[in-house]
Image: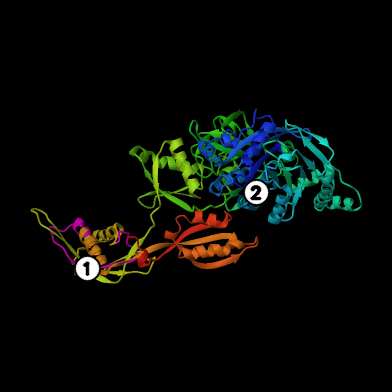
């Protein structure tokens, strides 16, 4: 397998744009599958998980390799990485971007540029990936290629190079006009095409577009531009060669048109993925050495360095790890070390994934994608290297940070579920780093990117790991603090024959500034309380604070001064002083009363400027205080605010509704403030 003829392509775009159907069409046209599956029937290669079939959308990263013989006579090894379009499953998009050499942005001819299109384009652009665009569903009712092309130009500016025009639209879509060669390509029912003259009404439009595209392509090549201006007309092959370099360098973005259902344009798309798309040699990957990013040449004879870019939980074989070999050649039996955890992993049998199908391979050279089972010490995003090689000190460049914005509290159904819950959640989070577990309270909290994200995770928890839970909203982490300074006495006197229990503590309890925590002060003089009992007094105070004040919430920001007390030479004990101190704190809180404190989060929302007013009004209605608004270079606006956590439990869902899914949200716990009395939970 030659790196120069390897193409690893991330299919990205909005949910419902037609990515999965396009994968089926490409696999079928290449002969990799006997018949294309249908999303509606749950029979596609990419979407084979029960959760995907039930919902009719992609939820995880689909892998689909196929061979393709291009017009240049070479046979290419193409691997498609089908990334979900839903924002809830953006972690799979991160994995696809990390492993791919370039991206194919899929846009529906019916729906045009959507929020998911914009988000996917922005991410692949930030990652520096070359891009091609394909307009799908051209056979559908209301398909309008020219309107979509205008939308693309408005959204993404210069650099878009339409290489095709549709011959007919909707049900009349029967072929494409090749803009570079100025030929019409009419398609037969078997997906093959033949050349025919362009319709009279289309020829003039195609010729004008040919001139525009030619000028766009040669403008980036000084020598070719000079010859073009002198009257020399470049050949189609020369234009394609120049365009391939411009695609690799991110200067041009070809636009194609297809129907994944009828097969029109699919073979042309495969040809151009191979002929215009960059190879593994063109796009060496970066890793991190200390604080510096280092480019790794994809040399099959170099030291082994492997990026485990995604793990999948398979109910039959266990954990399956998707690998991109950055350097060297990996073979079954190799022993590699995880550069982060230092766990040594033995590579068992290697295979390529095509959906759920395992295709065994003997070796995987640099630049290629494969899979391996049972690497239990290698979570998503890890690097594997020769223990003695230079890669052993390197780590993977971390993916884009995606803070959790939605959470649910989990309660195991049975004791057996409780016993297995922790291990199962650990495996889930190893598979999907955008999931996280919070055990900071007495409840297990699962956090993620949205309600569908968590719903699918819990379904997989039950199906793959056999662990069943019930869910509830995450309780708001209210706290209490004392209203004013007060003195109180804690007393334990118990005589029942033999040793009794005796302790008296005099406490002065007062509030501290918000966020100060707890301060314990020893002001005992004259040995009223022996020194050895003071640690027990402090422990009793902290236990009383943790058990909650009059409203039942943990107590914070408290200064407790012990200034006097009494003890007994026989009946006093640590337990007596712990109990007396706890009693004294509770009496002080009851006497002085408490204020309930609510957690406040720092919220940052990036939205199109057209949605700024709606978002700010909504934040204000949630008792939010806007602290800053910043206009960004891309025309969007960053809004920063502080908002009570009690108002944010479903905010990500409401925000997507308000903005049509065009918002980016970050929420970070910030501080506590006094909760208004009328909003204190009963």
Task: Look at the picture and state if 219 lies above or below 23.
Answer: below
Q: What residue does disc 2 label?
A: 111
Look at the image and say whether residue 642 sits in the magenta stretch: no
Answer left or right for 407 relative to 43. left
- Rendered location of residue 419, percent (x, y): 36, 39
Which of the pair 259/350 is nearer the observer?
259
Q: Quadrant of residue 38?
A: top right
Q: Nearest the camera: 624 or 379?
A: 624
Q: Residue 326, can we see it? A: no
2 vs 1, front mark: 2
Residue 278: x and y in percent read 72, 43
**Where is the N terminus found, in terms of image quarters?**
top right
Q: Which residues are magenta?
A: 551-578
| Residue that extends furthest to the bottom in the rendered view of this protein | 485
Callout 1: SS: strand
Q: Which residue is mark 1?
A: 488
Q: Which mark is residue 36?
A: none
For the point 72% across and 51% down, the residue is: 147
The numbered mark, 2 or 1, whose residue comes first in the sequence reads 2
Tell me if I can see residue 338 in this picture. Answer: yes
- The residue most toward the right is 231
Residue 612: x percent and y percent? 57, 63
Colour mode?
rainbow
Identify the residue at horizontal 40%, vertical 39% (top origin).
468
| Residue located at (50% from left, 62% from top) | 618
Q: Residues within 10 Å of mark 2 (few under 14, many from 20)?
A: some
Secondary structure, mark 2, is: loop
In the picture provided, is 310 more to the left or to the right than 195?
left
- Quarter of the picture containing the C terminus is bottom left
How far apart are the alpha carbons under marks 2 and 1?
Answer: 70 Å
Callout 1 crowding tier (Cα within 10 Å): few <14, some 14–19, many ≥20 = many
Residue at image point 71% right, 47% down: 144
């Amino acid at each position: 397998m030659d790196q120069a003829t390897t193409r690893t392509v991330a299919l990205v775009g909005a949910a419902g744009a037609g990515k999965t159907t396009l994968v089926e069409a490409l696999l079928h046209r290449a002969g990799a599958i006997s018949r294309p599956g249908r999303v509606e029937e749950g029979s596609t290669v990419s979407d084979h998980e029960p959760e995907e079939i039930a919902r009719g959308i992609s939820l995880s990263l689909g892998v689909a390799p196929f061979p393709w013989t291009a017009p240049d006579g070479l046979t290419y090894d193409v691997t498609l990485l089908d990334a979900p379009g839903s924002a809830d499953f953006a972690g799979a998009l991160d994995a696809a971007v990390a492993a791919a050499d370039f991206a194919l942005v899929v846009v529906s001819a019916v729906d045009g540029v959507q929020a998911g299109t914009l988000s996917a384009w922005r991410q692949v652009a930030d990652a520096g990936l070359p891009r091609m665009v394909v307009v799908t569903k051209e056979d559908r009712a209301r398909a309008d290629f020219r309107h979509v092309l205008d939308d693309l130009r408005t959204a993404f500016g210069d650099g878009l190079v339409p290489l095709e025009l549709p011959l007919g639209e909707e049900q009349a879509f029967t072929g494409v006009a090749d803009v570079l060669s100025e030929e019409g390509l009419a398609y037969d029912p078997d997906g093959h095409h033949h050349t025919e003259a362009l319709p009279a009404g289309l020829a003039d439009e195609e010729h004008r577009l040919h001139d525009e595209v030619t000028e766009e392509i040669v403008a980036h090549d000084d020598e070719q531009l000079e010859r073009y201006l002198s009257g020399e007309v470049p050949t189609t092959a020369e234009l394609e060669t120049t365009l391939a370099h411009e695609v690799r360098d991110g200067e041009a973005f070809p636009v194609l048109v297809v129907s994944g259902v009828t097969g029109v344009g699919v073979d042309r798309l495969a040809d151009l993925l191979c002929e215009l798309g960059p190879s593994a040699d063109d796009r060496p990957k970066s890793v991190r050495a200390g604080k510096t990013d280092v480019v790794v040449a994809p040399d099959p004879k170099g030291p082994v360095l492997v990026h485990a870019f995604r793990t999948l939980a398979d109910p039959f074989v266990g954990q399956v790890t998707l690998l991109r070999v950055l350097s060297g050649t990996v073979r079954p039996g190799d022993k590699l070390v995880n550069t982060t955890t230092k766990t040594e992993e033995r590579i068992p049998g290697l295979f390529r994934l095509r959906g759920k199908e395992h295709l065994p391979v003997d070796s995987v050279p640099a630049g290629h994608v494969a899979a391996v089972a049972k690497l239990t010490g290698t979570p998503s995003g890890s690097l594997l290297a020769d223990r003695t090689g230079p890669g052993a000190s390197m780590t993977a460049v971390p993916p884009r940070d995606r803070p959790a914005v939605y959470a649910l509290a989990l309660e195991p159904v049975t004791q057996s579920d409780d016993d297995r819950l922790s291990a199962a959640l650990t495996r889930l989070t190893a598979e999907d780093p955008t999931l996280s577990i919070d055990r900071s309270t007495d409840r297990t909290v699962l956090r993620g990117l949205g309600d569908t994200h968590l719903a699918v995770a819990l379904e997989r928890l039950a199906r793959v790991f056999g662990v069943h839970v019930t869910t509830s909203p995450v309780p708001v982490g209210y706290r209490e603090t004392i209203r004013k300074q007060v003195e109180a006495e804690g007393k334990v006197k118990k005589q029942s024959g033999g040793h009794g229990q005796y302790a008296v503590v005099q406490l002065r309890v007062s509030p501290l500034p918000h966020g100060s925590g707890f301060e314990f002060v020893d002001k005992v003089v004259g040995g009223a309380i022996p020194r050895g009992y003071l640690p027990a007094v402090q422990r009793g105070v902290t236990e009383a604070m943790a058990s909650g004040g009059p409203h039942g919430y943990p107590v914070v920001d408290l200064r407790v001064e012990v200034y006097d007390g009494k003890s007994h030479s026989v009946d006093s004990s640590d337990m007596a002083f712990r109990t007396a101190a706890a009693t004294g704190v509770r009496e002080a809180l009851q006497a002085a009363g408490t204020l309930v404190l609510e957690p406040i989060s720092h919220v940052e929302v990036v939205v199109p400027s057209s949605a700024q007013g709606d978002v700010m009004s909504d934040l204000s209605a949630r008792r939010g205080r806007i602290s800053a608004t910043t206009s960004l270079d891309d025309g969007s606006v960053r809004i920063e605010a502080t908002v009570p956590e009690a108002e944010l439990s479903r905010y990500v869902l409401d925000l997507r509704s308000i903005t049509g899914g065009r918002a980016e949200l970050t929420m970070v716990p910030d501080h506590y403030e006094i909760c208004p009395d009328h909003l204190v939970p009963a």
